[in-house]
Image: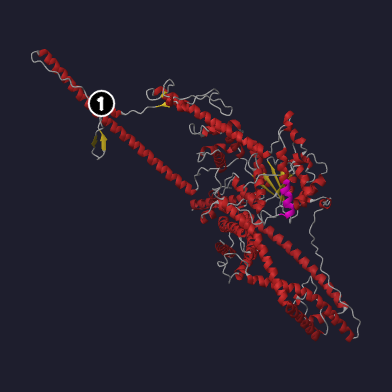
Amino acid sequence: MWIATKEDLKNAILRDQVLRHLEPTKNRAQAHELIGNLYARYVILCNNLSELYDQTLQVQRRALIEKLLISSQERLKEIQNDIRKIEMSQFIFVDDALVELNLTTYDIEFLRPFYFPRRRSFECQQVINRASAKVKSIESELIEEPPKGLDRFRKIPTREEREAAHEEARLTFIINEIKRHEKARQGRILEIDLKHMPDKIKLRSTDDDDDDEKVFYEFQHNEDQIGKFKIKRTKFVADLYSKPVNTTQYDYYSPPEFRINRLGKKVLIPKVKKQVEIVEEINTSDEEEKAEAERKLKLLKEEEEVTKFEAIKLHERQNEAALVIQQCFYRYSLRKQIEKRKIARLQTYGMHRKPVNLDLPNIYDPIVEYENKRRERKKEFDEALIKALEDEKARILRLKSESIMEDITEDIREWFREFYKEAKDFHRYPEEFEGGTIMVMYEKTKTPEEFLIEKNKTSKEKAQERKDKRKAKRREKQRKKKEKEREKVLEMKKKQLELKEGVTFDFSNMKEWKAFESLQKTFDEGENDFQFIDELKNSKELPIWEWVTVDAYCDVHKELRLIVDDLMRVELQLLRFALSLDLKKPYVPQKPKKPKKDKKKKKQRKSVVDIFEERSIEECFNELKELNIIRQYEKKSLDEFIGECSYATTDLRALNKDPPLHYGDVKNYIQTEILGSAAQIKSFCIIGPEKCGKKFLVEALCSEMGAVIFDLSAPKIKDITDMSYFLDLVLQVAVKFQPSVLFIDGAHKPYIRKADDEVKLENPWKLGKYLIKDIVKNLANDDAVMLIGVTNQPWNCNFRYLRMCYEKFAIFPPKLDFGTALKAWHTGLELKRIYNFDAISLGEVSRGFSVGDILDSIDKHIDFSRGISLYSNPLTCNELIENLITTKKPIEDKVVKQFNKFVEMLDPYIGLRKGEIERVQEELNKAKEAKEKMKNKKKKS
């Protein structure tokens, strides 16, 4: 995979270089095609590099992959910004690139980066583990009702025991229901058999003398056994018999006769009832009796011939009927074969789901388990490399420390001699913060000539030089200021020109391509380092020992140079003291140079109280846990989110129309913005209608990041009095246990305008006074702490303050798209073990409802009683949609308009789109006028 990923990286860098040398263009579609192809390649590249970093054990190659991954993600962020400028939208659609590369939208999803989930310190992780274990033990001790009477002395069941008892009771109820229906079925079959076959199936009699044939009836009435009717029941299963009949013992039995038909097959000859021939002696004397006998004999022969003819006709009709049945069965079997082939083809394409047995283990579990084991071994390889480096350093220090120190000392003394020979003085010894004598090796100190010029300067010259430096600084500041103003003017003129003539896309501007230069440099360095190393032979992923030795030598040189520098500073002082004695001048020791103060100090968060001075980390964590501020959540995956992406963006863009947003597009935008390493986002707001999956997304993102949730919703903090201390405690604990998420359910409530009586009881305005000042402004970029809010009424608040709280917003459409609605129906039905249900008609009808409404209606409608009757009474679309309409209410048009209006308020590109539409319309109008003028000229001429 590493070799294939390197080839992909080479290809991406080459395409970037080609894109850099292309001429500027005003064709928006052409620019989108070029940059969209590059975007799809970089997303796949970042995902592959992230997987490589996660599963690579060789430490030195992993360090190179990390550098490449960071540079690739930064470059990907630059490409995202370029595409958004081209599309004039926050959302990215690259359908044309997907068609070209034979990919789907799922192939270019931004997967979880390599640095998630971040590992906490061992102490903090132990606190979390103990707190979760304590909560489980407390829940197990809780009971639904307090014990009364003698129940006070009984054993209190634990939570696990109660759950097991509940599950056992549920299974017992299901088994009893199945038994009840089975007994009723057997009773119905018995009744039919006794009614229609009385000669073959009878009840045995108990009056026989033979004891072996007697059946002793057994009556049961157990409390744990439920019948169709709760009465004593006889075991009828043993009371039926059917005696075998041996037909060969009868006189009228004859073996079947067969004949060979025209197809060469055996065919049974139908049997004709034999008529008893009446042979009587005819008395010739009695002519009348003789005539009567002849007449009767003739009639018998005629009847026999008619019977034979009818039997032959019946046999022919039976053959024709059999032929029709065979033809129908052949067509039926052929349709079944065609259907099986069609299903197999659809399963190959991933368009047909196989029934999943939830009792069986997941087929991907062994792969995940193997990846986890390999991930855990990374620490072992890191420790092995550190140990090897320390051992190599110890070996070098033991064997070559003296020679190395002698070499460094000889180099410094040579510098002393050369300087004294030419300048008759000694240079100031470089300080440790400057790099020490490494500056001498790199020739970054003053030369003897420069030293003499500086030494011979008078005080006036030095003062004048300082003035000139200050003037130069002022001139440089003024020049930069004028340059910025000129750039602003040029930018304004450029925007005005773009509004008139259209935007020009120039990809040769390297000011916006800083990440590409870093990526190319890192890749070239890695290629040079690994050029002569055969990685295929290193199957055990051991460190490269030559590099370990080189790194050990570097570390030893740095450590020994510090020791030598301290000794040589003393030697330099002795040399300067001896030089002052020779020159008969007083010795003045040189003042050490001080490091420059960093004017750009990091902004530190002001803390009301240092929480951890008086209290331990575990006490603070448990306090927030008891207040339900820190809450547990179920581990979820982003892949479980129900949302389909848009697939018609290319066609709509060709018609100059904005592609509509789908739930999958919004999910991908949130996933990219929050999980992307290049995006330093500290606050994010997710907006959407009720039951669209906002909280599910938050919990899935926290599961991906391994974050701790601090719930600051209005109901949780309404009873807190000292808000300043509380928020300071929350922030300090969140920083200590990072990655952390500060979650607000109802992001509009701190600045709500119209509140109901129920909402007023929560005092929603309580957090609004402190939200911006004490939380948003104190979120540092270095800390992995993020504020995430969700709301379904963003218009019912002060928009100005809401915009100040959150950096970015993601808005789900108020109505479902067809793909998401169809996926919701399929997901809900598959949870009920109903696969491949044709719900296409439901997808369009249910767009006015939410995903949660669809899942709830399926869960409530298909209960146990409806589930067991699915085979005899199959599910229909009418049944499902009627249940949805009767139990749920669709979203109102008023709410849809409010959502659409709020989307326009938050869209930063809406002005650009309107200007572009007006410009295109003006060009079309001018073209029409020009055509009309040409027509008029032709008519006049």
Is 677 above or below relative to 387? above
Q: Is residue 860 above or below residue 393?
A: above
Q: Nearer the viewer, residue 228 or 717?
A: 228
Q: Main secondary structure of the magenta part?
A: helix
Judged left or right of residue 154, residue 539 is: left
Residue 102 appearing in the image: yes
Quarter containing the N terminus: bottom right
Report the span colored magenta.
Answer: 120-131
User: Per the image, is 410 magenta?
Assistant: no
Q: Label 1: how many residues lie within 10 Å, few (<14), some (14-19) or many (20+)?
A: few
Q: What is the x, y in percent for residue 680?
A: 70, 55
Q: Measured along the vertical axis of the image, is residue 887 above or below residue 65?
A: above
Provide residue 175's location: percent of width, then percent of height.
55, 33
Q: Residue at x 91, y 83 (%)?
A: 585
> Is residue 146 left or right of 606 when viewed as pictured?
left
Q: Which residue is pictured at 88% across the width and 77% down the height?
A: 589
Q: How many marks?
A: 1
* Tag 1 residue: 251
Between 58 and 3, the residue placed more toward the observer is: 58
Tell me the element at label 1.
Answer: loop
Left or right: where does residue 640 sit relative to residue 838?
Answer: right
Quadrant of residue 783 within the rendered picture: bottom right
- Where residue 262 appears, as percent x and y from the top left, is 23, 39
Colour style of the rendered protein structure: secondary structure
Q: Amino acid at mark 1?
A: Asp
Horizontal and vertical percent position of residue 801: 75, 45
Residue 747 in sight: no
